[in-house]
């Protein structure tokens, strides 16, 4: 479904999200040898401009041992992002596969599948539409951030297939993918429809979908 392009992903926004990705990685419980040292080795050298930006924003500092470490200011930014990310994982993924015709959710049948392969095959059936961007709009979230979070949860951001950091996966073609997904995503405004001559607003459609999604989440938990 073609959508009007009413957004722009700036270079500053790319740095912001790449920076959040890096802060998130720095906060993971890696062993000491995996921390980012100032003299970045190998594929980590591609991170130098990003660390310069993080230093400028005062989100990181350099420790006496010459490692990058998160500052209190950076920690505050990271904690706010982690709260949003945890909410995304808990509340938004359920809207990744919705049957708009039947008002049904793929996750209603999650426990019927014994392996991940069959579940993924089921998720890719034509009847399912991804409503996460529309739900983000309804909830007042930045839908670019929702797409970024989906890439983060699928381990598709920052590193290539070989597991190494790459400029393309931080600042380059990865953002072309995110942009294209945003352009093609179902938007809230497209969900209004007529029923027996009466207009059902997009707001009403989303209110019903979100209500059903929350009920299903409660059941699944």
Image (cartoon, helix red, strand yellow):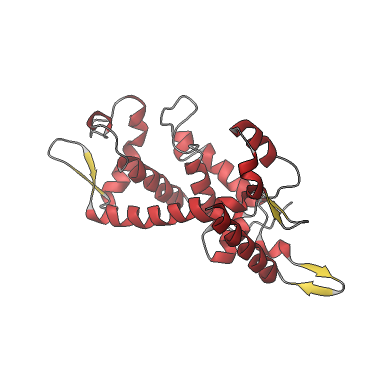
Task: Check the image and name the residue furthest to the bottom.
Answer: 198
210 in relation to 107, above or below: below
Between 136 and 55, the residue placed more toward the observer is 136
Q: Is residue 50 visible?
A: yes
Residue 180 x %, y % = 62, 45
The tally of labels here is: 0
**Residue 207 position by quadrant:** bottom right
Left or right side of 8 for 170: left
Residue at point 87% right, 72% down?
Answer: 196
37 in relation to 62, above or below: above
Q: Is residue 6 visible?
A: no
Residue at point 60% right, 54% down?
Answer: 132
Between 49 and 29, the residue placed more toward the observer is 29
Between 107 and 161, the residue placed more toward the observer is 107
Left or right side of 138 for 21: left
Task: Check the image and name the residue furthest to the right.
Answer: 196
Residue 69 x %, y % = 23, 43
Residue at point 83% right, 70% down?
Answer: 195
Residue at point 72% right, 71% down?
Answer: 201
Residue 5 x %, y % = 64, 56
Residue 217 x %, y % = 56, 56
């Amino acid at each position: 479904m073609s959508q009007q392009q009413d957004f722009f992903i700036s270079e500053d926004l790319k740095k912001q999200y790449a920076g959040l990705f890096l802060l998130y990685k720095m906060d993971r419980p890696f062993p000491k040898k995996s921390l980012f040292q100032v003299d970045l080795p190998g594929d980590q050298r591609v991170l130098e401009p990003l660390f310069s930006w993080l230093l400028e924003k005062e989100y990181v500092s350099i420790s006496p041992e010459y490692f990058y470490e998160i500052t209190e200011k950076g920690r505050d930014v990271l904690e706010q992002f982690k709260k949003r990310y945890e909410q995304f994982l808990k509340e938004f993924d359920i809207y990744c596969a919705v049957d708009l015709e039947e008002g049904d959710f793929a996750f209603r049948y999650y426990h019927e599948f014994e392996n991940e392969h069959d579940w993924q095959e089921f998720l890719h059936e034509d009847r399912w539409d991804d409503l996460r961007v529309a739900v983000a709009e309804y909830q007042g979230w930045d839908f670019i951030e929702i797409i970024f979070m989906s890439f983060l949860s699928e381990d598709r951001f920052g590193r290539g297939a070989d597991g190494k950091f790459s400029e393309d996966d931080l600042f380059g073609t990865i953002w072309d993918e995110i942009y294209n997904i945003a352009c093609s995503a179902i938007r809230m405004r497209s969900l209004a429809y007529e029923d027996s001559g009466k207009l059902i607003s997009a707001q009403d459609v989303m209110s019903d979908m979100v209500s059903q999604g929350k009920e299903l989440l409660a059941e699944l938990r």
